[in-house]
Amino acid sequence: MAARLNLVSASAGKRVGAWLIDKLPPAVLVGLGYGVGMAGLLGAAGSGTDEAVAAAAAGLFLWLGITSLLALAYGIWKWGWEARTGKTPGNVLLGLRTANEDGNAPGWAAIFIRGLIIAVGGLVPVVGAVIVVISNLWDANHQRQGWHDKVAKTLALDVNAGRDPLTTGGLYGHSTFTPAGGPAGAPQPSFVGAPAGGPGFGQSSQSPRFDDNAARSSGIISGIPGFSGPPAVSSPAGATADRSAVPADTSAAPANTAPAAPEVSESSPAGSAPMQAPSSHVDDEFANTRIRAAAPAPADPGSVQEPAGLNIRFDDGREVAIESSALIGRNPAAAAGEEVDQLIDFADLDRSVSKTHLELRVEGGIVWVNDRNSTNGSAVTGPDGVRQQLVPGAPVAAKSGATVEFGDRSFVIGQA
C-alpha cells in the first residue's frame, strides 16, 4: 500500500463521536456509584428506622466519592495520554489524533486549554459543549479548527484517511517517511544550507508521488518564456546518449550544429530561456531536484549587492522569503535537470494543492508565477483587484500586494 503523504482534517461527526466516547467511562463510573448508593438508601427507607437510613445515606456518599475519584484518575490519565501521543479512547476507536499546529504532540497545556473551553461551552445546557466540539464547521479555513483548537493551537486529524504527523515527523514529514531514493542510479537531491544527513527547514527529501491526474493525458510544454529548461549534457566518448534529455524529433537538426537560440517574449523575465517540460505530468513521477548553489561574492569589494527578493505569506500565516526561484506544492520536486533555489512544502489538509503546483521566479521586484500543470489550477489577483487565471506554461507577473491562489489555498506577495 502506498504511503499517504497528505494530512486530513477530522470531520465534525468524528470529532463529536470521539468526544462522546471519551466521556462515557467517567459517566458510567459515577452512574454506577449513584445507582448502588441509591439502591441501598431506598432499601433503608423501606425499613422505617432512622439508623438504617443514615447508614444508607453515608453509603451513597461513599460510593459517589469512590467512583468520582476513579473518574478523576481516568481524566488525568486521558489528559496525559493525549498530551504525549494525541490519543484518547475515542480518538483510537475512530482513527483520530490530536496534534499541535506543527504536527507534533500537543502537550499538557494545550490539552488542558482545549478541554477547559469545551467545559465552558458546557455551561449552556445540553448543546453548549457539543457546539464547541463541532465549531470547526464555521472555520473559513477549510473547517480545520474549532474554537477550542484555535485557542489551544491544536489540530484534530483523521489518520485513517491521511498521514499521522506524530509518527511521521510532524506537519511536513521527514526523510525516513519517504523511500530512500528515486530511479536506480539517479543522484539524490542536495539542499543549500541543509545539515549533513537531512534537508533544511521548509525543504523535503525526494519522496513518492501520487498520481493526481491519472485520467488526464500529458503533453510536452515547450517554449515557455522566462523559465529555464534542462541544461545540455555532454556524454563522454563511447557513452550511450540519453534520448530522454533531447526533443523527440531531431531528424531535421544537422549534426554538430547548436540549436537556435529561443525567442524571448518582451513580457518574460530578462535573461531567461524556454523550458522543456518532461513528457509526463510533473506530479506523476520522480524528479532529480538540483538546488542552485549560492551566488559568489562580487568581484569588486566596494560593490553592493541588490537586496534579496520578496516575501510570500500563506493563508495559514506561514511566511517565506523568495530570493530567486522556488517550487510550491504538497511535496515539490523539479523536472529532470532543472535547477531551483527553494522547495516549499505546503501541507494542504484538503488535498487541493498538487505535489508540484507552482513555480516562482523573482525578477526586478516582480514574481513571475507559473502553474506547473496542476490539478485544481491557479490564479493571480493584482492589487487592483483584477484576477487572471493561470494557463500552465504561461507565467504571469505578480507585483507586491498581489494574491496568488493555488487550489483552494492562497498567499500574498509582499516586500522582504
Image: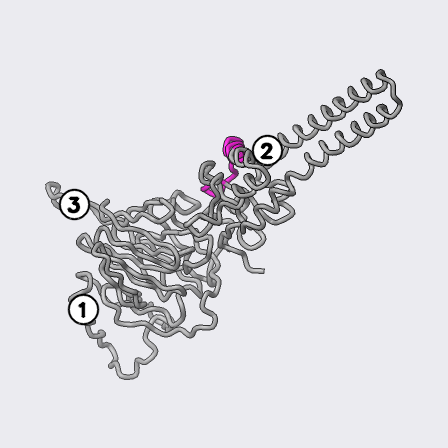
Kind of residue indicated by mark 3: Gln
Spatial CA span between label 3 and label 1:
26 Å
Q: Which of the two discs, 2 and 3, labels the residue nearer the N terminus?
A: 2
- The residue lying toward the viewer, choosing from 118 and 106, is 118
Q: Quadrant of the N terminus?
A: bottom right
The correct choice, above or below, for 306 with respect to 366 in the image is: above
Query: Taking the image as drawn, is residue 162 in sight?
Result: yes
Residue drawn 85% across and 16% down?
A: 51
Query: Taking the image as drawn, is residue 336 in sight?
Result: no
Spatial CA span between label 2 and label 3:
54 Å
Element type where label 1 sits in the image: loop
Residue drawn 23% across and 60% down?
A: 386
> Residues in magenta?
100-116
Element type where label 2 sits in the image: helix
Q: Is residue 281 magenta?
A: no
Q: Give the image location of residue 80, x and y in percent.
A: 59, 32
Residue 234 occupies quadrant: bottom left
Which class describes the residues within 10 Å of circle 3: few (<14), some (14-19), or many (20+)? few
Q: Count all numbered tags in the image, as a single digit.
A: 3
The correct choice, above or below, for 344 with respect to 395 in the image is: above
Which label is found at residue 176? Answer: none
Which label is found at residue 305? Answer: 3
- Which residue is tagged 2? 79
7 left or right, relative to 306: right
Q: Which of the two discs, 2 and 1, labels the residue nearer the N terminus?
A: 2
Q: Give the image location of residue 250, x and y in percent.
A: 30, 80
137 left or right, relative to 317: right
